[in-house]
Amino acid sequence: MTIKTDKLLRKITLLMWLCFVHTIVIAEQIPSDTAVYTITLKQEMVSKTGKPVAAMTVNGGIPGPTLTFQEGGYAVIYVKNEMDVETSVHWHGILLPNFFDGVPYLNTPPIMPGETQKYEFPLIQSGTYWYHSHTMLQEQSGVYGSIIIEPKEKTLEYDSDLVIVLSDWTEQKPMNVLRNLKRGNEWYNIKKGTATPLNMVIGRGGLGAQLNFWKQRMEGADIADIYYNAFLNNGQITSEYPEFKPGEKVRVRIINGSGSSQFWLTFGDEDPLLVSADGLNIEPISRNKTFIAIAETYDFIVTIPPAGKVEIRAMAQDGSGTTSAYLGSGNAILAEVLPRPDKIGMMMKMAEMNMRMGAPAMKLNPSEEKPQEMMDNWGMKMDGKMEGMKMDHAGMDHSKMEMEPASKSEMKMSKTDSSMNQMDHSKMNHDAGMEKSMANDQKMGMKDSRGEMPGMDMFAEYNYDYLKSTEKTNFGEDIPVNEVLLNLTGNMWRYIWSMNGVPLAEADKIKIEGGKVTRITLNNLTMMHHPMHLHGHFFRVINDKGEYSPLKHTVNVPPMQKITIEFEGTESGDWFFHCHVLYHMMGGMARVFSYDTPRDPRLKGFPLKNLLQEGNHFYNWGTAEVASHMTEINLMSSNIRNQFNLNMEYGYNQNMEAEFTYERYLYDYFRVFAGVNMENEIPESLDEISTTAIVGIRFLTPYLFNLDVRLDHKLRPEIRINREIMIFPRTSIFGVYEYQMDLGWTNTLPETGENTDFKGETTWAAGVSYIFSRNFSVMGSYDNRFGAGGGLTVRF
């Protein structure tokens, strides 16, 4: 027994030593300053406005918790998916290994229901950042939160920190929001009070401007797409922070984590000090009214006033709502209340300018992008007093710009992990002429002899000229430059968004060459703002500060403007580049930037096509009209190129028509179709039903008429045209005209004693509709087949 016991003790001792050595080895591999978090995603009922709705929470809340780290440390984050759908988390603005970026199917596997995914990366930067889901529309449902990375050395003077996450809240399911946008319903603008019916336009003297917009297939100037039930800061419509005392300097870290809302920030009392943009320090500047685009972060140092309480107010860009945070206690010093934007005034000013709007969001041949040709054909056209600026801009030669070697800065980081490359944010030096021209481009580019651009003052505040890097950001003169032009394009009628007229589902990757500077011109050919975000990189936003142009990870491109960004290719793998208006991204405004390196083997079984086709799903909707003289049902199913339509009309006088068609969009406004049509041959009798095969084209014409030209298998040509116009708030008029000819090519025409060369049949209808809600309207109409009547329209 003694011998056996000794052997057992020796084995136990050996095992303990092995465990000890293993622990030492592991401890040497994991930094001692590792910060570990676990966040859990759940589906729960959440109420922000008094109505519980299905949402997604992070650790039980919306927004999720703030994750705090130390620069130079190491982050380990476990994400638990306790939902019944797959999910993901992207660490927005964080420089990290490609595999942990969090875009499912691109560089990170999705997190399946019941799974836990581990993210780990060194922390090579400091500042204010955030995280959010990158799966479908989950960010809108509540999967987002903030990140603070404290610097190794504190360079700014302040007493305390406060994170404010701005967001928007809808009581609808996000997929229903997108479906409503796809069908072109005007309800959101009506609900927000931002619709511009014809009576208001005429009352302002803007009929000519409206006709100009209609001619270019544009309904009018637009700002924001969606009606939100509330706008939130840190999950509340109004937040109070009474713990801050008079004289205390608070670093307020503001993050715009919205799904599709951009905000104007205003502050009570003295102007705060803006000290950081997108996580990076800038030259401090006293600034009050500030535009914060989706996904941007701005840090302000706010001094609590002697009165003890100051308001920070965020107004949605279209003026449809606000959210406020109050710092301190006592009598509040309120922030400036900004006026709502004047959409009709914007439309009238833009109509004065020689610009061509409505660039296509879809091309006949998506493999031939031709971005330069698109930029030449669409957008701002300069003539007359603008010609001088055109020549000035055209004379810019990027290849001959004066360059200076890069200096060291905070963002000249070395990635310590073996999987990460050296990062060197060097910068470009502009001569005075270049700086002036770029600054002008940011402000719509062209001025008259008085220094004013007619009609464009409404865009003047959307530039980044107030941002200046604390150190030079120019690149070395020996680094080659690759120029890329990306026109931002969209179709509001079908809610398809793209770049160079090519949505993500039809686009090739954009190759990024390591060791080169990639300089991208973002040319916005739409009426909407687009905050463009590049994963895994910071880029220079060229402004009037020249070689001190700021570094950012997200840049807002205003309507009909150009912005130039550039970065050095120091990474590997594939990275996502997209508009951070969530519904624009889902509509196709995204691309994959690729260093053309081998795909991570850990992504086997997670095909990239799952991401690329994310915006190409079929969306289904329908309408039903139940009236005193007829019933009509219309069902639609549509993706980017394909559309199925079923329409049935039945009059109580026994006239009927039913039609099923398949349509193929060749580009935005033109599609071909084929299908089957059924209708009664004898008026007011169902005794004879004629069934015909049909083929034809459908076209959205200038001035927004829907044109249908077709031919059935009896060789009878037919033309159909319809139009709807909102004439008063909530009230629209509509008209339909159809004319079919029978030339007797396949049958014998009846002898009528008149012209027997052809037989013609005319059908027409006209009516008025009043919209009560997103799903219901009342209507009255006269149809020459069914007679007059009225009833209810239901949308589903």
Image (cartoon, grey):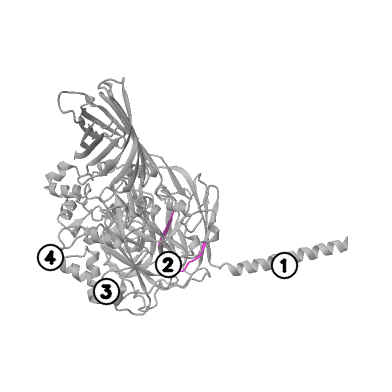
Q: Is residue 171 visible?
A: no
Q: Would you name the residue on which mark 3 appears?
A: 397
Q: Residues within 10 Å of mark 3 (few under 14, many from 20)?
A: few
Q: Of label 4 and label 3, which has the lower sequence position?
A: 4
> Marks 4 and 2, how far apart in space?
47 Å
Residue 216 vs 453, above or below: the answer is above
Q: Of label 2 and label 3, which has the lower sequence position?
A: 2
The picture quadrant where one finds residue 726 is top left
Q: Of label 4 and label 2, which has the lower sequence position?
A: 2
Q: In the image, which residues are magenta? A: 120-132
Disc on res. 779: none
Q: Would you name the residue on which mark 2 appears?
A: 126
Residue 45 vs 432, above or below: the answer is above
Residue at image coords 15%, 50%: 209
Q: Would you name the residue on which mark 4 appears?
A: 385
> Marks 1 and 3, how far apart in space?
68 Å
Residue 714 vs 145, above or below: the answer is above
**In front of the other: label 4 or label 2?**
4
The picture quadrant where one finds residue 94 is bottom left
Q: Nearer the viewer, residue 705 or 127?
A: 705
Q: Of label 4 and label 1, which has the lower sequence position?
A: 1
Q: Of label 1 and label 2, which has the lower sequence position?
A: 1
Name the dominant secondary structure of the magenta segment. strand
